[in-house]
Image (spheres, helix red, strand yellow):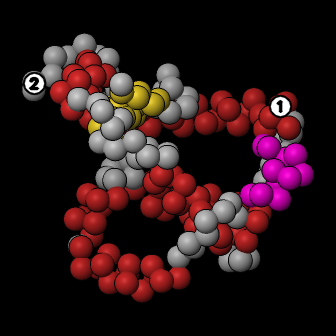
Amino acid sequence: MLGLHFFMPAHLTPLVEVVCGQASHLECAQNLHAFMRQCGMVPVLVKKDLPGFLANRLQHALAREAFALIDAGVATPEDVDAAVRFGFGFRFLAAGPVLQRDHAGLEVHCAAGATMYPSLAANTVPSQCLAQKVAEGKFGMKTGEGFFKWTPETIAQERQRYQNTLLAGLDLLKSELPPVGDAVEQ
């Protein structure tokens, strides 16, 4: 048994996780990985099945800290989004967190981590600001309000902006994406 986890919107997001279970055969996972590359996807091999797999765990680690900063009054939801989109998130188009550390210097990031890690959020439950919105039935676009207010018109505009941005990102990364149908050496 293997898991195949796509990301929304699946028709635009190139990443797919190939997830191994306890009894999965690595060779089968590698074959599925190669097949997904031939389909033009960017597969990652997740060697151990755990909640959230790989990418969602990374995403939730970021979200936990983001919402903790909002709860603490350090920043607004708009400022958190801007910091991610136009700061380090923007650089993630060019390099993930590991490669980025090699660019900047491991000693710099090790020292920064030693300073920041003790104060990072370690909550084991969702943040107050997130849980409160859910308790109030404010689920985001689907209910017309979450952290932001939504109308049918603003939802349509935002979805179009989001899709256009993803398409532009794909265009920037196209030289790094596997061509559809290319054979992969094993």
Side (left or right) of 117 relative to 106: right
Q: Which of the two discs, 2 and 1, labels the residue nearer the N terminus?
A: 1
Residue in the image at 54% along x and 37% along y:
165
Residue closest to the eye, 123 or 174: 123
Judge whether 1 appears above or below 75 on screen.
above
What's the magenta region? 130-140
Res 149 seen here: no
Check residue 153 in the rendering and tell me which mark sits there, or answer none. 1
Depth check, mark 2 against mark 1: the one in front is 2
> Element at badge 2?
loop
Question: Is 173 covered by the magenta stretch?
Answer: no
Q: Which mark is residue 68?
A: none
Q: Which residue is mark 2?
A: 185
The x, y position of residue 110, in whole percent, is 30, 78
Q: Is residue 127 above or below residue 170?
A: below
The front one of 177 and 175 is 177
- Please, which residue is most extreme toward the top here? 181
Q: Are marks 2 and 1 in contact (CB under 8 Å)?
A: no
